[in-house]
Image (cartoon, helix red, strand yellow):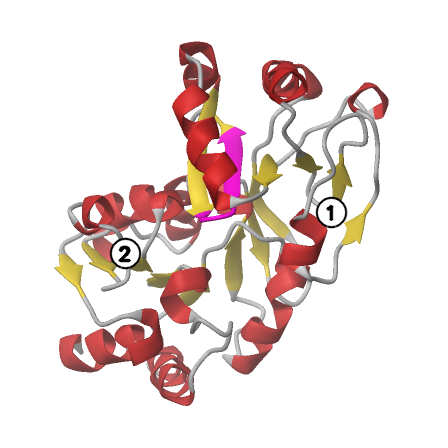
């Protein structure tokens, strides 16, 4: 199995899959190697990439919400799912009330920008086919939520990461998926969690996995995979987690490594 992060990894800076990457990944699929996209986004937000790569068969799956949901592509059947309840979010909500920060809460189908906090830019940044339903924290239902996103200026998030309390660090898995996006997941949630479930579905282990990534939210799968490939544009601490480093996302780093490896 080849697992691929999107932003900063498979996608170029202008959010496209290059012709070379598309060709090489389709060749892998034709040889029986499972190609799996691993993203923090919901499947609707990346469907054009799934279609571009031809990952629309009954046995094709995607890791979404940074591992919290493993979903079959064409029929949207759920293979594995794990979320947080509303009570888990209270600590984070209080932190944002005190600091004046925005939050968007995601279940497994839509996004809830919290209206009792600072307005968020997440909807504009995501620019995807998913419903945004503004709600106050008090009006959130008692149901599972996949993750919470803080989307704001990178300088503000730099400050937020310095203000994270020990209690928050213990309660959430906190990852900077993009310079302007900080994500809060269930404390043991990671892309590797979703990949473990999917590998087991095929009767495989992490010894059967090659993973590509560039950022904090890729760290689990890069460390767990037999071959963990970090993009040249990844930070030094992320590069230290993998087994290999390839060219940047704008230089067809995924295709270049796969061509040489196989």
- Magenta region includes residue 92: no
Magenta-tinted stretch? 178-185
Residue 150 place in picture, x, y as percent:
59, 37
Residue 194 in view in this figure: no
The quarter of the rendered structure image containing the N terminus is: bottom left
Drawn side of residue 161 relative to residue 128, left or right: left
Quadrant assignment, res 3: bottom left
Q: If you read the primary sequence from the N terminus, does the residue marked by circle 2 or circle 1 appear first?
A: 1
Q: Which mark is residue 109?
A: 1
Q: In this view, does 120 lie above or below 34?
A: above
| Crowd around label 1: few <14 · some 14–19 · many ≥20 (10 Å) | few
Label 1 SS: loop
Looking at the image, how many numbered discs can be counted on the residues? 2
Label 2 SS: loop
The quarter of the rendered structure image containing the C terminus is: bottom left
Q: Which mark is residue 52?
A: none
| Crowd around label 2: few <14 · some 14–19 · many ≥20 (10 Å) | many
Most common secondary structure along the magenta stretch: strand
Residue 152 in view in this figure: yes
Which residue is identified by label 2? Answer: 234
Residue 174 place in picture, x, y as percent:
44, 31
Q: Is residue 26 above or below residue 13?
A: below
Residue 131 place in picture, x, y as percent:
80, 52
């Amino acid at each position: 199995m080849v697992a691929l992060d999107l932003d900063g990894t498979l996608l170029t800076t202008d959010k496209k899959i290059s012709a070379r990457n598309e060709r090489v990944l389709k060749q892998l699929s034709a040889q029986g190697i499972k190609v799996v996209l691993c993203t923090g986004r919901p499947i609707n937000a990346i469907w054009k990439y799934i279609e571009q790569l031809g990952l629309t068969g009954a046995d094709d799956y995607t890791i979404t919400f940074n591992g919290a949901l493993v979903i079959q592509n064409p029929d949207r059947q759920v293979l594995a799912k794990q979320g947080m309840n509303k009570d888990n979010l209270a600590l984070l909500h209080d932190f944002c009330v005190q600091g004046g920060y925005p939050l968007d809460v995601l279940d497994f189908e839509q996004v809830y920008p919290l209206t009792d906090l600072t307005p968020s830019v997440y909807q504009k940044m995501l620019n995807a086919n998913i419903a945004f339903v503004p709600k106050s924290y008090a009006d959130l239902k008692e149901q599972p939520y996949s993750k919470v996103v803080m989307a704001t200026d990178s300088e503000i998030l730099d400050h937020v990461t310095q203000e994270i309390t020990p209690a928050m660090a213990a309660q959430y898995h906190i990852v900077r998926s993009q310079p302007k996006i900080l994500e809060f997941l269930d404390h043991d949630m990671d892309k590797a969690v979703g990949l473990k479930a999917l590998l087991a579905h095929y009767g495989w282990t992490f010894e059967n996995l090659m993973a590509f990534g560039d950022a904090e939210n890729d760290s689990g799968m890069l460390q767990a995979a037999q071959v963990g490939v970090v993009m040249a544009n990844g930070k030094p601490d992320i590069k230290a987690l993998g087994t290999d480093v390839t060219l940047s996302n704008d230089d067809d780093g995924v295709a270049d490594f796969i061509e040489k490896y196989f």
